[in-house]
Amino acid sequence: MAPTKRNVLIACLVLLAAIAAIYLQTGSFDFLVYDDDDYVYNNPAVRNGLSPAGVAWAFTRAHAANYHPLTWISHMADCSLFGLAPGPAHLVNVLLHGGNALLLFLLLFRCTGSFWPALLAVVLFALHPLRVEVVAWVAERKELLANLFGLLAMLGYGQWVRHGGGRWYLAAVFFFALGLLAKPVLVSLPLLLLLLDHWPLARPAGGRVAVQRLVEKWPFFLLSAVSCLITLFAQNAGGAVQSLDQYPVAVRLGNAVVVVLAYLGKFFWPAGLAVIYPHPGQVPPLWLLLLSAAVLAAITVAALVARRRLPFVAVGWFWYLLSLLPVIGIVQVGYQAMADRYTYLPMIGIAVALAWALAEIPTFGRRAVAAAVVCLIPLLATLSWLQTGHWRDSFTLFNRALAVTADNFVAHNHLGIAWMEEGEYDKAEAQFRAGLAIKDDDFGAWNNLGVLALRRGDGSGAEEHCRRALAINPRFAAAHNNLGLALYLQGRYPEAAASFQTSLQLEPEDAATLDNLGGAYLAMGRNAEAAASFEQAIRIDHNFAGAWYDLGEALLQQGDRARARVMFETALEKDSSFTPARAALNKHFPEAAR
């Protein structure tokens, strides 16, 4: 018997209530020192809120080794609506995940007409602990947005197949393009549409028809190809793509085979989840590689054999494999061997295969599916609620990662950053050095030791650490900037200016580095060049109180007291607690200070 609209509505409300019960706690969570800084609270373009200039920046810049303009715009909208507040940003993620759950249910229910299997698949997808990383991490807004538009594209495609009409096809292409502009993880979607043709849309295939199915999707394949090229350019320019010397092809392929099976293991037994799983950097043990390959081959053969009688199994399995391809590490980005966030789209395939396979159990299939739904909702919700708690702040997150993984130099490094932000310099140094004891060529940790030395006023120590970082990665803009600060602290102003200029060649729109360069010029008496550098920093980040103040100092040196006073006052408008500007007003313009 077909479910009533009331039953469908109740199911959707229960699903949303379960998602809310898991994730509303994130409304009290903080930003993390991992990506949230680059994406939000240390990103002037985002902090300044939504504006025509911000939108132009989003579409014309590749920042943080990524090109995803819609994601930047989303973060800008957060800042315009809520200010620089982590709680509302987290809750927007929760809302988007709830929307994705409803869209997936709508897609599966419309395409199959099967209520309980569709609901079970969505429960397995939406409430699983593997989803926590994407929902509880503000920086993963990109994954949520990309999949939102991807599901809308699939819905549009399904409508076009069933009812025709060019508008549905255009809608599918349009939403797919938006998804790629949020995160290029959707590049495999054209292949997923081919799977949907087989099941549940049951379109004729074979011979010329198969060719037609490919040809009709040419806009999707074209968009995917363009997105891949842009992404490779952005990631290479940002230094995120690891070299073949560090991760040879054999290492990448071996890790990929093992990880495909490891993700399945985490689906069925979601224990020991962590924000980062460090890449071993070597070919997996032969026994593990052979076992993983044998299991994957057996599942693949079984899915192919059963593709006519159980088409959903084959579609679900190949959905899983194909949507993992962009993130499996053949192109190695970063230091992770795998990541929970990478399972957001792929695990839909596994959830679908299991849900419909369970419905095929003879005689009591429908009751079995219904019972599974009823039992799984509280179980998965509880596990996910507990996992979400580990994302409360940087300390809980990275301490958890250290507790459940081995040799996690990335977790040590970011825990050190968190302690440094709290002013606990000894604890920060201990974490940086613990990470370097595991991986002594981690240029990020050497740079962080340099930052720590700067905060302690140790210019020569900072110089040593930053040069160590640059010996490993000469294109590390932050280390060039920090080296400049170390040289400045030692009074070596021309050398400092040269380091700042090198940093700006790599990151031309870094307002802080421009401000530092202006400071070096000012120390050398090159006041006009200093003022120009400060003005450029302000154009990039008009809320940068320090740059407004520094511009005032440069104008004072040029004898322009009227404009200098305005600059000091503007610095206080931007940050009322900025004491150097207040001191400057007291000293040079006592009548204004009163």
Image (cartoon, rainbow, N blue to C red):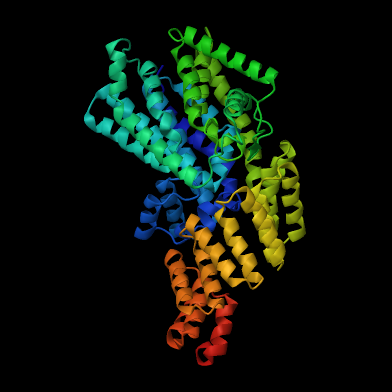
In terms of image quadrants, where is residue 276?
top right
Which corner quadrant of the image does residue 453 belong to?
bottom right
Q: Where does the image place residue 408, in percent across and percent down from the top left?
A: 70, 40
Task: Look at the picture and state if 4 lies above or below 483.
Answer: above
- Residue placed at 58% from the left, 58% from the top? 480
Depth check: give the residue in front, 97 or 37: 37
Residue found at the very far left of the displayed protein? 165
User: Horizontal and vertical percent for residue 134?
Assistant: 54, 40
- Where 533 sits versus 195, above or below? below
Residue 535, relative to residue 465: is it above or below? below
Residue appearing at x 34%, y 35% in the figure? 223
Q: Is residue 552 left or right of residue 387?
A: left
Q: Position of residue 204 (x, y in %)?
A: 31, 12
How many tags in the picture?
0
Q: Check the image and report above or below for 172 versus 362.
A: below
Residue 457 appears anywhere in the view: yes
Give whichever of 64, 395 is nearer the camera: 64
Residue 306 visible in rendering: no
Q: Is residue 205 left or right of residue 365?
A: left
Quadrant of residue 154 within the rendered picture: top left
| Coordinates of residue 246 in the picture (x, y in percent) | 61, 36
Decide if residue 184 is on the left or right side of residue 340. Answer: left
> Residue at position x 44%, y 73% from top?
532
Q: At 69% across and 33% down in the image, what residue appears?
A: 272
| Quarter of the figure that contains the N terminus | top left
Of 381 and 472, nearer the camera is 472
Q: Which of the pair 187/13 is nearer the observer?
A: 187
